[in-house]
Image: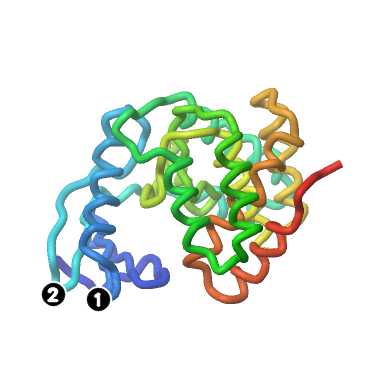
Amino acid sequence: MKLDNVIATRKNKTVYRDGKKCIKLFDESYSKADVLNEALNLARIEQTGINVGKLLEVTTIDGKWAIVYEYIEGVTLAEMMEKDPRHLKKYMERLVDIQLSIQAHTCPMLNKLKDKMQGKISQTKLDATTRYELHTRLEGMPTHNKVCHGDFNPSNVIITKDDVPFVIDWAHVTQGNASADAARTYLLFSLEGDTKKAEMYLDLFCLKSDTARQYVQKWMPIVAASQSVKAIKKERDFLLKWVDVVDYE
C-alpha cells in the first residue's frame, strides 16, 4: 500500500488514498481495542444497508494499526456549503434527510449510547454533584435503539457524481436516541463558531423529525459533558460551558 497521498489528518490518525482504497493509519497512542472496535462498527453498519465505504481489511503498517476501506469518489456536503453558500438551506436539508434515514435503521449489536455516555460522564473532571446530576438526567431520558452516527457533520457526508450520499467515519456509532445524535451535530456546528448553521440545522431537524426543540436541548449538557473527555482544551472549555445550562426556555 502506498502512503504518499494524504487526504485527511486528524488527531492520532492520518488518512491516505491508494487508488480505490483508503488507509486510516493510527499512531502508537491509539489502542488496538479502539481500532478493532471501529472496524467492527463499520462492518456492522454495512449490514444495515446504509451507504458506506466498505471495510476491506485491518492490518499493521510499520507497527501501527490501520483500517483499509473503500474510497468513495465525490464531494462532501461541507465543500458544497462552502462553495455555494446561497443554497445553504438546501444542503442543510439534505444533511438532515440523510441523518434521519440513518436513524431509521436499527443495529442491535452496536454499543448502547446511554452506556457510552454514562462512562464518559464518569471520566470527566466535573465535581461529584454535577456528575450526579448528569447521570440522573441521562438515566431519565427515553431509551431508543436507533442508529446514531455520533460524529454526524457535513464533512462526513460524500455525494457521488450520481448524487448518491455515502457516510464515512463510523468510529463513534452507537444505538440510542436520535435527539442525542442531533445534539451532538448541533454542538459540532457550534464548536466551529457557526451559529447560523447550528440554528438552521436544529430548526430543520426538529421540523423534519417532528421533535420539540426543547427535547433536543435537554440532551445538550449530557452530550457536551460526554464529548469533553477527549477534546482539546479549547473545545473542552467550550463544551463544559454547556454543562452549566440546566434548563431552557
Task: Say which residue appears at 40% left-offset and 70% top-offset.
Answer: 9
Q: Is residue 31 left or right of residue 208?
A: left
Task: Identify residue type, mark 2.
Answer: Gly
Mark before the other along the chain sequence, 2 or 1: 1
Q: Is residue 235 left or right of residue 230?
A: right
Badge 2: few (under 14), some or many (20 or more) residues near its Cα, within 10 Å?
A: few
Discs 2, 1 touching: Cβ within 8 Å: yes
Q: Is residue 189 visible?
A: yes
Task: Say which residue appears at 57% left-offset and 53% top-offset.
Answer: 78
> In this orientation, which residue lies closer to the viewer: 248 or 5?
248
The residue identified by callout 2 is 63
Q: In this rendering, is residue 179 above or below 19? A: above
> In this orientation, which residue lies closer to the viewer: 193 or 163?
193
- Quadrant (top left/top right/bottom left/bottom right) for the C terminus: top right
Look at the numbered disc 1 and give the secondary structure of its residue. Answer: loop
The part of the image, by quadrant, that contains residue 149 is: top left
Q: Is residue 66 left or right of residue 62?
A: right
Task: Say which residue appears at 44% left-offset and 28% top-offset.
Answer: 145
Task: Identify residue type, mark 1.
Answer: Glu
The residue identified by callout 1 is 28
Q: In this rendering, is residue 213 above or below 74? A: above
Tell me where residue 223 appears, x and y as whole percent: 58, 50
Look at the numbered disc 2 and give the secondary structure of its residue. Answer: loop
Badge 1: few (under 14), some or many (20 or more) residues near its Cα, within 10 Å?
A: few
- Quadrant (top left/top right/bottom left/bottom right) for the N terminus: bottom left
Tell me where residue 86 appears, x and y as whole percent: 74, 48
